Image (spheres, coloured by chain):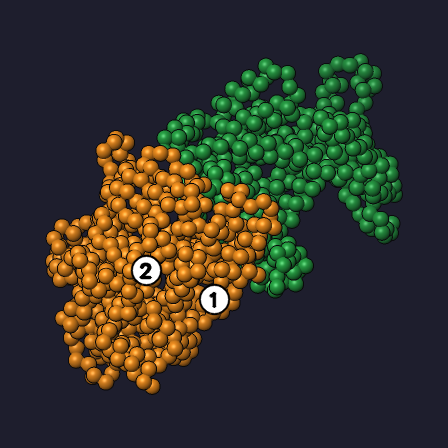
Chain colours: A orange, B green
Amino acid sequence: MMALNPMTPLLDIQDLTIDFRTDEGLVRAVNNVNLKLHAGEVMGLVGESGSGKSATAKAIMRLHPGNALIRQPSRIQLHNGKQPVNVLGLSGRNLRMVRGGLVSMIFQEPMASFAPAIPIGEQIVETICIHLGHDRKEARRIGIELFERVGIPLPEKRFDQYVFELSGGMRQRAMIATALATRPKLLIADEPTTALDVTIQAQVLELMMELREQMGMSILFITHDLGVIGKVADNVSVMRQGKVVEAGAADRVLYQPQHSYTRRLLDALPHIHSLPQPPAQTPAPIVSIDNLSIDYQLAGSGRKGESFSAVRDISLDLPQGQIIGLVGESGSGKTSLGKAILGATPMSQGQVRFHTEAPFTLKAGAKIKRRQVASVAQMVFQDPYSSLNPRLTVRDIIAEPLEAMGLTGSRQETDARVIEVAKRCHLNVDHLRRFPHAFSGGQRQRISIARALICNPQFLVADESVAALDVSIQAEILGLLKELKREYGLTILFISHDLSVIANLCDHVVVMKHGELVEQGSVRKIFTAPEQAYTRRLISAIPLLDQARLDAQVKQQVRA
Amino acid sequence: MLSISSIFRGRAARQTASQDDAYYTAGQFALIKARFMKKTAGLVAGFVLLLMLLMGLFAPFFSPVDPGIDGADESYRRGAPQAVYFWDQNGFSWRPFTYTYVKDQPKTDFAALLQGGGGLAALDKLTSSGALNASSQNKYTVHEDQRRYLQFFVRGWEYSILSIDTLGIDIRWDRHLVGVEQGMIHLMGTDEDGKDVFSRTLHAIWVTISIAIVALIVKLFSSLLVGGVSGYFGGRVDAVLMSITEAVRVIPPIPIYLACAVALAQIDLTPTQRYFAIAVVIGALDFATLGRRLRTHILVERTQDYVLAAQLSGASHMRVIWRHLVPSFGSYIIVDTLINFPYVILAETSLSFLGLGLTEPVNSLGVLLQKAQDPDIQQNMVWQFFPVAVFVALVMAFVFVGDALRDAADPYSERNK
């Protein structure tokens, strides 16, 4: 690596201002942002969606979309070892040498970042040939070496596979290998671990830190997760609405936050040591699951027997009035289980008993009594966009269960119920005539919850219901769920892969792996004294801030 | 405190609501309209289309002359278009006027032919003089001193504005937008029978469009049935229905039309009824493309969470299909239908060309277009190309409106913005 004056930053962003042309006029996405990144340093860029962090990162590689206007006197200076270049003034060949040569980027969704019809190795070979000028044979050798280095087992074999043949973690590793192929000085990582399971996330983070040590590169790490930042970053910049609201050394920002927004982000992290004591007696179950199995017929196989077992022989009691967290990595069968309880996925074995006022049982193979289920159990979905019919008004969406089942006598009665439920979910009742497109993700999720609540169910299944939301919005929705539990005695099965959300919300936790139940217990027990090795691995993989220092900080605040 | 009625039915509140609110409460069609209004080409085409449709629908009112054989102007056969003026060398007039056009009688001296004792020499002389040529029959004299002033809302032949046979309703009227005091006005000339080309064209527009509407409605119904059932239920139902669709798709349409024409010839039908029957057959057999597209659309849409949400809300199959799924492709169907209009009109014209569709004396664009292929018309009566211009304008208008509407439709496609 070229010696660089330690005082000269590798990346120097000065007064970066970006406007976007939209139908509603100009929108300022990035407002006068200044960032300095030195060689070998990891800078965490934190913010929620729309904060301008991705727009900033893309501007460094000039990847911003065509409707973006970069305002004067913005400068993005990159030091390539000889003299600084202003990226914003580059074009053609010089720009291509910056992209992929000096700066590389890895993205959130590795699946979408690789061409699906070209073997992965081929895509890396192409990069190496262009930037380093090796022949194909040599490039292939380097590529396989890189695969080995990022910890992909059987690198020779994987090199010729297609992206869909690799698991999520492997894809992200391959992505990193591609990014590193040209030995960049700066790696921009845009939410590189957000789509990954927590154990895979830990591995990928560790890998990135290792590679940074070995190759001496700088990393601009974009994320919304302060826990991850605490693990990797030297310096942190917190962005909000296009502006940097707080910047400084990671230790200072995380443990002595100045800005209220940073504090709010920190509050969203789990506080494992202050988990509540479980109640002395577990309440009676409202739903009992007996020996439930779910098999999916594999696509394209007409014959019996070729099936995939998503859930295997699970028996579970869901205690009334509690929020039960259902945790597992992707593919563990947690969503299948949640849907099967509501009769939305056919069971192949077992039964689900509802201990409601009028008890009933869903049996495998029997016809589902949809209306019976609908009046006591409802679902809140993950995606607040696809779960609301865009062609109905909010009033109609919320009223749908009442109207579909003909539960109310008149329109006035329905309207009154809708208003009541909307208020309960803190929706503005003046906005009920609006269509979903007028609402943000968080508000949409409130609408979804209101729809679920309108026929006074006793049981809710919330499937990753906050996964698509920003941290601060997440906190609001979690608050609402807690409130509903407290005030109306609602039982909620909360499905999530995000352990910090589970820790903040749930009373009881169920851990699943590969369709089987691993462990269950109170949230305190699972997080502080897990019995199974798998649970321990999950818990230890959560990126957390140093609890002792956080506690000290709280004490300090109390004293002050 | 908000009363329920003020929230849901507050028309007054709606008027005072801010512009933002208007956007947020805008339904699907309001949003499509808002976007459509931004497209100049679409707007212009829409205006032209609307104008033509109106003129077609109320053709008897807009036509100065009865297009049938009853209204044929025997004294002005093969007559050229008559121009309308406001002024000439005789002075200015606020009221537009035209002249008296008098057809020149061919100066065929049959007496001379007889007097000469007949014989081939005399006949030869007559034919070589050009008096019998088609072009010489088009000659006319304009009497500029005999102005014919245009009258508006004149009484003319009686026609029915609205007639529903089954209900016994038949509202008749005899007013027309324009006319002249004496004789007739032929804005676009006349054909060889003396029928007014302008009036025929206006009447043809609606005949053609109504046939297209019948064909498209039948097509839509069969597509919805096949595509909807196939997409919603999937699995084996889907496999069987799609196999049938593919089988129908590979049969070329022309032999089917031929077979239909022969079969229908056995039944005693008026030409128009016969053609409507063919339109029904065309529509019924043309479900393959749209049906397949709808199926794909539903296959995608039914996996959306909101459909599951509706099912979990206790909604029945029919409610899910009609309240949630059908509106999701409503805009698509409208756009597809509009874009398909010109193709159906083209099908009508090409069938007429093959002699399977409508034939003289029915007024349809296909019939008039077929007529325009006659060399006699091409050489001597170019004004009979007027229906061609109208046809091109109509098809273009449909294409432009359809295009603009397709771009404007489904504003929710950008739902993640």
Quadrant of the image for the C terminus of chain A?
A: bottom left
Rounded to the nearest angstrom, the CA distance separating label 2 from label 1 is 43 Å
Q: Quick one: label 2 or label 1, which is nearer the N terminus?
A: 1
Question: In percent of the image, x 14 and y 59: which residue is there?
Answer: A151
At x 30%, y 49%, the residue is A317
- Residue denoted by label 2: A506
Q: What's the amino acid at mark 1?
A: Arg
* Label 2 element class: loop
Badge 2 and badge 1 both on one subunit: yes
Q: Secondary structure at mark 1?
A: strand
- Left or right of A279 on screen, residue B299: right
The correct choice, above or below, for B4 with respect to A241 in the image is: above
Specify few, some or many for label 2: CA neighbours under 10 Å numbering under 14, 14-19, or 20 or more: many
Horizontally, residue A442 falls left or right of residue A237, namely right
Please state the chain letter of the residue tagged with numbered disc 1 in the rendered image: A
Q: Chain of mark 2?
A: A
Most foreground residue, A131 or B312: B312
Q: Amino acid at mark 2?
A: Cys
Query: Which residue is found at the position 49% from the left and 28% from the top?
Result: B285
Q: Residue furthest front?
A: A281
Residue at numbered disc 1: A21
The answer to which quarter of the image holds residue A172 is bottom left
Relative height, residue A212 to residue A422 (above, below) = below
Which quadrant holds residue A550?
A: bottom left
Viewer-closest of B337 and B313: B313
Question: In the shown orientation, is residue A390 left or right of residue A228?
Answer: right
The image shows residue B8 at horizontal and vertical percentages of: 61, 55
